Amino acid sequence: MLKITYLSHSCFLFDDGNYKVLIDPFISGNPTCPEEFKSLVPDFIIVTHAHSDHLGDAIALSKQFGIKVVAVHELANYIVSKNGIAHNMHIGGSFDFPFGRVKFTIAHHGSSTDDNIYMGEPAGVLLTIDNKIIYHTGDTGIFYDMKLIGEMNSIDLYLCPIGGNFTMGIDDAIKSIEFVNPKLSAPMHYNTFPIINADPFVFKQKVESLGKLCKVFEYGETIEL
Ligand code: NI
Ligand code: MN
């Protein structure tokens, strides 16, 4: 059974009983991340792009505990330049890790560091773990190729931003669910800061009106998939 925990913002932990895989580890600087996760040590980290609310603690954790960070080439090289450990990938490529498969998808967004250095393209993640397929979009606006992603993959869990301003808001996220056609959707990237405030229960109601399932995670909540 795959356990999925929401640390808040775009940070999710996947635990298949053997490996703990953390996506977008925005922990120490994140006002909404529960205190109990500040000492979490995962086995692998996947980062969608370089913005500090996604790269987060990845480099510090990698340096301290020797954790491999999976990222697109330019960002992976940056992580290594800061003395972290990385696995370089790029959009469209897949790789089989001990925990499962990672494939990076496109995302329409940016990917600069805090000092405004560009780190290649932002990405979304298709994670196959414990025979489940999770699509974490990263930060993105809606794009029609989501339909292709949904056609080529039977998505068990779709993690999509709803906070607007920097990413899709609720209405575009709802449209994207028509494209991706997942078994279950969950909102992310909202209410961390006032500029991305959104009501996840408005989203949930709209998902359910499509006849589809939606899970609104509480901060720190774990579900089994
Ligand atoms: Ni971003
Ligand atoms: Mn972001």
Image (cartoon, helix red, strand yellow):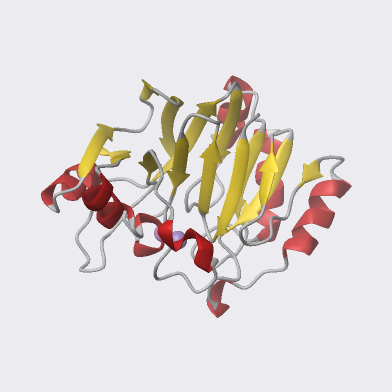
- x then y, percent, for residue 14: 54, 39
Residue at image coords 45%, 26%: 99
Residue 96 location, quadrant: top left
In the picture, measured across the screen, residue 69 lies left or right of residue 141, that is left
Residue at image coords 56%, 37%: 135
Residue 104 location, quadrant: top left
Residue at image coords 70%, 57%: 171
Name the one closer to the observer, 190 or 216: 216
Q: Is residue 53 above or below residue 131?
A: below
- x then y, percent, for residue 195: 54, 76
Q: Is residue 169 visible?
A: yes
Q: Is residue 55 above or below residue 47?
A: below
- x then y, percent, for residue 58: 32, 53
In the picture, measured across the screen, residue 185 lies left or right of residue 81, that is right
The furthest residue to the bottom: 194
Residue 21 location, quadrant: top left
Residue at image coords 61%, 58%: 220
In what quadrant does ligand 1 lie?
Answer: bottom left
Q: Is residue 26 visible?
A: no
Q: Quadrant of the C terminus?
A: top right
- x then y, percent, for residue 212: 82, 40
In the picture, measured across the screen, residue 154 lies left or right of residue 12, that is right
Q: Is residue 55 above or below residue 183?
A: below
Q: Quadrant of the N terminus?
A: top right
